[in-house]
Amino acid sequence: MSGINVDSSSVSTIQCFRNLVDLHVHVSCPDEDERGQCIFKLNNDNVTELAMALTQLEFLVLGCLCSKNTCLTTIACLLPISVHCSKLEELEIHFNTTNIVDDFRNILEGPRFQQLRSLPKCPLMYLDLFSAPLRLDGSDLETVAKGMVDIFPSLTDIYGLEKSWNELSRQITDLREGSE
């Protein structure tokens, strides 16, 4: 599908379907060589509203992640999804990774997120991040791994085209093995 954006008007009409368990919006952003912008126009507040309205979701796909890194959403939108959609098994959602380490530090240490962090979270085990960019090393990998496990306690595997996602997945495995 071309010409379709995932924006607040496109998801606000869906929010009245409170018992919805499967929401798939299959649209893709233009490739690197193609001109065009990211189709994902939601922000963290829009995603939180969606998660709070559709608490029965088991599958949530809002377009394939792209490498543009221009999204208004950050990893901060993942925590409300995990808390409010407690049955979620599949998730694909754009988020900006430009400041991912600082974003995770904010979630892990910031008082604004403490109450959400203390609540039960979804059973999501696998996260496919396609071509979302990620550039990390050393202690930054550990910070992001701890943050991902905090948001998705059942997470065992992350896949992405960038090498850093695979390194992050290994770091999560190491974290899990160290806690057993």
Image (cartoon, grey):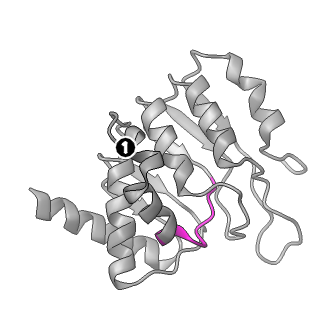
- Picture quadrant of residue 25: top right
Q: Position of residue 98 (x, y in %)?
A: 61, 73
Residue 96: x and y in percent read 63, 64
Of the pair 79 and 133, the residue shown nearer to us: 79
Decide if residue 51 is on the left or right side of residue 145: right
Residue beneath disc 1: 117
Toward the front, the furthest residue is 111
- Magenta span dominant secondary structure: loop
Depicted 42 relative to depicted 52: above or below: below
User: Residue at position x 44%, y 39% from top?
Assistant: 82
* Crowdedness near tag 1: few (<14), some (14–19) or many (≥20) residues, C-alpha within 10 Å: some
**Residue 28 left/right relative to 168:** right
Residue at far left of view: 180
The front one of 146 and 176 is 146
* Residue type highlighted by circle 1: Arg
In reply to whether residue 127 is colored magenta, the answer given is no
Q: Which residues are magenta?
A: 94-101
